[in-house]
Image: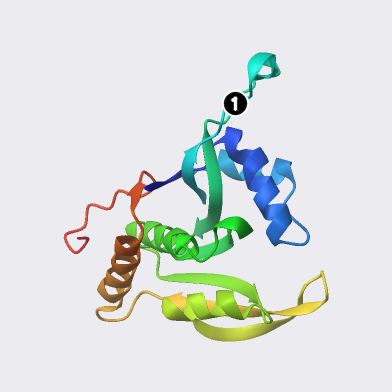
Amino acid sequence: MSVQLRPMRPEDIDQVTAIDTHCFRPPWPKRSWRDEIGMRNHSHLVVLCDGLVPRPPGWRRHLRLPGARTPTERVVGYGGMWLIAGEAHISTLATHPDHRGLGYGELLLAALIRRALARQASSVVLEVRESNRVARNLYHKFGFRLYGMKAGYYREGNEDGCDMRLELGGPGVRDQVLQHCNATRARVNHVDAFNLMPQSSDA
């Protein structure tokens, strides 16, 4: 089955918020997602969809507010990144607990890194809980290195945050990172409507 990467839309917010509530404490409020979607110049939001949302049976399919847009695709993961002054900051990344172990987290991370490469970012940075070994291992796999610790960064549990960084400016580094992203993409059958990178090194 093929999954699809595409930019996040306002009608995705309910599904994204549901996943966010499963994965993070505290989750982002819906208004934050709406604000992020509206800042296209700096905020880059991607969703991963694995199929169509079933239509409600009978008369229930007609229950919606005037002007509301009904989601047609099922969102199973999402990611967000800010791009400011040549630095890409991954703000969030998650897959639904029922869809883990399928390579979706890696695919989302690769999509964000490819967007950063396309926009000529010099580095990609992020924070992750010190206790989140799974996420830290994923970031290490892509070449992120521990840059420092942020004491009490996460209010929930007063946990320290790992400040991690992927430098993109060294000789051959960009091609190496892109090759790793492409290898990740090759492992998951998908359609990418989020990134179109006109680079000769992109296979």
Q: Residue at 53% across / 57% down in the picture?
A: 82
Who's the residue at 83% across and 74% down the image? 157
Residue 126, quarter of picture: bottom right
Residue 131 place in picture, x, y as percent: 69, 81
Q: Is 121 positioned to the left or the right of 170 in the image? A: right
186 on left or right of 84: left
Identify the residue at the far left of this view.
200
Residue at 65% x, 77% y: name it.
132
Viewer can see residue 77:
yes
Q: Which amino acid is tagged 1?
A: Thr
Q: Which residue is denoted by mark 1 in the rendering?
A: 70
Q: Quadrant of the C terminus?
A: bottom left
In terms of image quadrants, where is residue 181? Answer: bottom left
**Residue 171 location (% of width, % of height):** 26, 81
Residue 67 visible to the viewer: no
Q: Is residue 166 above or below residue 189?
A: below
Residue at (63, 42) in percent of width and height: 15
